[in-house]
Image (tube, rainbow, N blue to C red):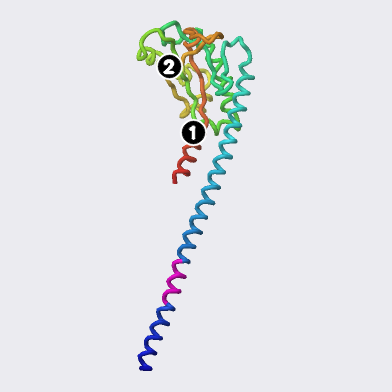
Amino acid sequence: MTSKYQRLFKNEQEEGHFWPSFTDLLTTILLCFMLIFICMMVIKSLQIEEMKETLDQIMGVRAKLVSELKEEFSDAAMGVEVDEKTGAIIFNTEILFDYGEDELKPQSFKFLDEFVPKYLDVLLQSGYEEYIAEIIIEGHTDRDGSYLYNLQLSQERAYSVADYIMSEDFPYENIQQHVGGKLTVNSKSYSDPRTDENGDYSAEDSRRVEFKFRLKDEEILDKTREILGE
């Protein structure tokens, strides 16, 4: 009898040793998962904070660029307008093209020879160039004709301007080296009309070409979304 009770007591002791050990193991595993989770959250938080600081810096660059472009083209004699929010340079297509045409006027070459260096001297100067992702020449039309007709017309006008800037006839080869890989053309047809001072649709103001820039903020935003998604 004594031997039997001794065996039962021994078994109970062994079971008692096993369960606390298993519980300790589970607790340790849980703590490890918690530590890993906390570390991941800290890393992600630091990454997002870095992205926010970069975005703030880029927004500061945009504001400075817009300010400098406004100062550079404050002279109304050139007939261009600077969008105070985006920094887009806007000028009526009559400066460059005859109505309904996509071939540059003879006098437009002189205008581009004067305008483009001034524009790019601001945009690509030291401290800004690394932030410039894209330089866009964008064509717009009025509502005369179909959407597709105007889509093609505005595209060909924008392309004509870009083609001249990148051609051998353009007198500033150093500029071509800087804009290569950044210069693109875009067509908006009549999808983005302009209004006059009374808020009414203006066909004359809607016919225009815009020089725009895109900063690398979109890539930063995409990266931020990627981090958040992870």
The spot of residue 183 in percent (x, y) is 47, 25
Task: Name the residue rendered at 50%, 53% in the picture.
Answer: 40
- Residue 54 has which mark? none
Q: Are marks 1 and 2 in contact (CB under 8 Å)?
A: no
> Is residue 152 a member of the stretch shown in magenta?
no
Asked if 199 appears above or below 72 in the picture, the reply is above
Q: How many marks?
A: 2
The residue labelled by disc 2 is: 191
Question: Hey, what amino acid is under mark 2?
Answer: Ser
Neighbor class of circle 1 (other Cα within 10 Å; few <14, some 14-19, many 20+) is few
Which amino acid, by three-letter code, is at mark 1?
Glu
The mark closer to the camera, 1 or 2, is: 2
Tell me residue 57's x, y (percent).
59, 35
- Residue name at image x 56 percent, y 39 percent: 52
Q: Whole-Å distance between the Cαs marked 1 and 2? A: 23 Å
Residues drawn in magenta: 18-26
Which residue is depicted at the point 40% across and 17% down? Answer: 155
Which is more N-terminal, label 2 or label 1?
A: 2
Above-or-below relation of 196 to 138: above
Q: Observer-nearest residue: 44 or 126?
A: 44
Determine the image quadrant of residue 140: top left
Most extreme residue toward the top, as rendered? 99
183, 205: nearer the viewer: 205
Q: Is residue 119 above or below residue 14?
A: above
- Secondary structure beneath dot 1 equals helix
User: Percent position (x, y) of residue 70?
Assistant: 62, 19
Q: Which residue is mark 1?
A: 218
Q: Quadrant of residue 190?
A: top left
Q: Main secondary structure of the magenta part?
A: helix
